[in-house]
Image (cartoon, grey):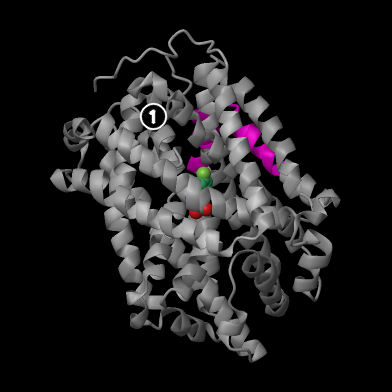
Amino acid sequence: MKNNNEWGSNLAFILAMIGSAVGLGNIWRYPYVLYSNGGGAFYIPYIIAILVLAIPFTILEYGVGYNFKSSFTKAIIKINPKLEYFGWILPVAVFIMTIYYSTIIGWDGIYFFLSFFKGWGANPNAFLTNTVLHPTDSLGGIFHFLPFVAISMLVGWFIIWLVSHKNLDDGLGKVCKIFVPILFITMIIIVLFSLTLPGAIIGLKELFEPDLSLLWDFNIWLAAFGQIFFSLSLGIGAGFTYASYTKKDIDLITSGLYVVIANSLFENFAALGIFSVLGYMSLQSGTPIPNIVSEGVTLIFVIYPQVFNILGVISLILAPLFFFTVYVAGITSMLSAFEVLSISIQNKFNMSRKKATTILVIVGALTSMIYATSCGEYILTITDSFINNFVIILCVIIECILFAWVFKAERLINFLNSKSQSLKLGKWWLILIKYIIPILLCIIWIGGINKLIATATNEYLLVIAILVAILLICSLIFTLLKPKSENWFKTEERIK
Ligand code: PFF
């Protein structure tokens, strides 16, 4: 019988994981992180972060997910039923992430629509500020609703519903099999074109000029670890959940390696394209690159439209292609984040996929409307840094303790090695996941708290306090609600 929650093939799993990893973080975050943290020299901490953190932790998440064949929350209960509350904190935090991620996708949706006729006009900077975002840098703008942003965000949520409410392989599986390859193809077209622009070499030189002295700066190591985490969607339960849907013959180690390699290729390729475009822009405007380069919102929604404005007719194809690529990257990542809470709810309340996704999409879409206001960008920045720098890192530390120590990750080694056609696990893996990763993450976490205390304003702390309250209360509610599934508290373990 066909299992509604199983990938039709191992390829579907790998492509879905690549879709989860390759997202907005690869396109608008990575190039700036690379540039501002030593350029070429950044590759040293970046590669070390991949070897020490990304690969071992990805294998751990996949292995445990496969072993428990259930939602993240249910797996925590199988480890110890008293820990159910902790099993809800991560899915709820990731759902908050899904909500603000939908905002950026919404902004991109507007630009995709505008790109067919360069609707941002001659001054993209003024357009973004005065027509799209109307930003305020305080909570003051909360009553100023932005209808276009709202509509575009609702379209994004509708797409999430369209894909997620279907059986796994008919929805998520099919979409990832079609759109992840398209994502790579469109990116390759955009980058190859960007490399031919006059001035591209100026941008690339600026990007890769290594500043080796920065290697002694602790911050570039932090940046590398943070980037790898976000970019690979590590520790948010996405890898865990997707791996729990795999079939028996899966080679999880090699699959993990494919995902890590594809993700790095994509973001480095994106960096080539973006800096070629910046070089072109620099040549055209006579402004040095350091004065043009920026991250996030400005890069995608101001600098790119400016470039499309001077590129001429070709941009009528290139601009829609670019904003479409960003859109697909965002949606396939959001789908994976959405899945984490959805499957926990399906498991506990014995709910169909259709019902759980419908309820969650409605709740998510309504809640996300807070970001469709003038202070949306302001709250988004705070939510993003808080969830990524504190909540997720803390969850990963807890995951390392629960999965590597309490569950005893050594039990996975034989199974994982028996299927692996590439890397074989040994003692080195256990040392990394039991000691090195949690210790490194504790250092990063404490460093982040110190920075927060030193720099945060009262209003900033107020937003964080509200987020913590929402996180803790929602997790408590999910814990206290009576399960509808008889198996919910069963602690049987799966023998592979
Ligand atoms: N990996 C995604 C990116 O690089 O944009 C970020 C991400 C998506 C993180 C979804 C977490 C998540 F749940």
Q: Residues within 10 Å of mark 1 (few under 14, many from 20)?
A: many
170 part of magenta stretch: yes
Number of numbered discs visible in the structure rendering: 1
SS at circle 1: helix
- In the rendered structure, the answer to whether residue 88 lies left or right of residue 319 reads left
Look at the image and tell me whether residue 302 can be seen.
Answer: yes
- In the rendered structure, the answer to whether residue 79 lies left or right of residue 15 reads left
- Residue in the image at 48% along x and 56% along y: 449
Q: If the image is split into quadrants, where does the C terminus sit?
A: top left
Q: If the image is split into quadrants, where does the N terminus sit?
A: top left
- The prevailing secondary structure element of the residues shown in magenta is helix
Q: Which residues are magenta?
A: 155-177
Which residue is under mark 1? Answer: 244
State the image coordinates of residue 253 (x, y, percent, origin top left). Answer: 26, 42
Residue that sits furthest to the top in the current view: 486
Looking at the image, residue 232 lies above or below residue 81 = below
Frontmost residue, 406 versus 451: 451
Frontmost residue, 127 versus 490: 490
351 part of magenta stretch: no
Looking at the image, residue 419 lies above or below residue 320 = above
Look at the image and tell me whether residue 329 can be seen.
Answer: no
State the image coordinates of residue 10 (x, y, percent, origin top left). Answer: 36, 35
The amino acid pointed to by label 1 is Ser
Frontmost residue, 186 versus 251: 251
Residue that sits furthest to the bottom in the current view: 286
- In the rendered structure, the answer to whether residue 425 lies left or right of residue 264 reads left
State the image coordinates of residue 63 (x, y, percent, origin top left). Answer: 30, 34
State the image coordinates of residue 403 (x, y, percent, origin top left). Answer: 31, 34
- Residue in the image at 80% along x and 50% along y: 142
